[in-house]
Image (cartoon, helix red, strand yellow):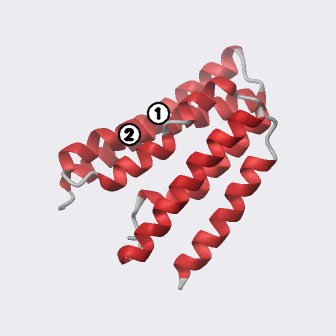
Amino acid sequence: MKDITFFTGTLVLVLISVAVPTYALSWRVTGGALLVLLWGYGLWRAQKGGLPPRSPIRLLPGHALLFFGLGLVGARAALWAWLAVPPLTVALDLARPRSLAAPVYAILWLDLFAVLHQLVALGRGLSGPAFWAWSGGMAVVAIPFVARGVLRVQRAKG
C-alpha cells in the first residue's frame, strides 16, 4: 500500500526537519507539533477511507521541507506565516462546501508563496534590484496559479 510508504517517509522527513534547524527549541517543538498533528490527521484520513490523490494532506512533505529551509536560513518572520500552513491544510481538507474551500485554498497558497519568497530571498541574500525581480517573478507565478486553483475548486463537485 503506497499510503504506508508515504506516511513512513513523511514522518522521517518531519523528524529531520524538526531536529536540524537552528530555531530555538520552543519554535522547533511548535513547528514539530503542528507537523505531527497534520501527519496524524492524514493517517486518520487514510485509515478512514483512503487518502484521495488530490488531498492537500499530500503536501505534508513540502510543508516539512519549508519548515526545514526556514530554519536553515533563520527566517523568523516567515516562520510566523508558516505556522498557519498546517491548520489551513486541514481546513482545506475539511471544507466541503466549495464556497468555503475557495477562500481557504487562496489563503493557503498565497501564504505558501509568501513563505517560499522569503526562504529564497533570505537564503540568497537578495536585495535591491535582485529582490524586486524575485518578488515580481513570484507575483507573476503566484497570482495566476492561485486564481486558476480557486476556479478549479469552485467548479469541483462536493
Residue 123 is situated, as x and y percent measured from the top left of the image, at: 76, 32
Report which quarter residue 70 is drawn in.
Answer: top right
**Towards the viewer: 147 or 81:** 81
How much space separates mark 2 and mark 1, taking CA atoms?
7 Å
Q: Residue at 62%, 31% (x, y): give it.
A: 79
Residue 140 is marked as 1
Q: Secondary structure at mark 1?
A: helix
Residue 107 is situated, as x and y percent measured from the top left of the image, at: 38, 36
The answer to whether mark 2 and mark 1 are in CB contact below 8 A is yes
Q: Name which residue type carries label 2.
A: Pro
Report which quarter residue 71 is drawn in.
Answer: top right
Residue 144 is marked as 2
Q: Name which residue type carries label 1.
A: Val
Q: Residue at 73%, 48% (x, y): give it.
A: 18
Q: Residue at 27%, 44% (x, y): give it.
A: 102
Q: Residue at 23%, 44% (x, y): give it.
A: 100
Q: Judge the density around disc 2: few (<14), some (14-19), many (≥20) Cα neighbours within 10 Å.
A: few
Residue 13 is situated, as x and y percent measured from the top left of the image, at: 70, 59
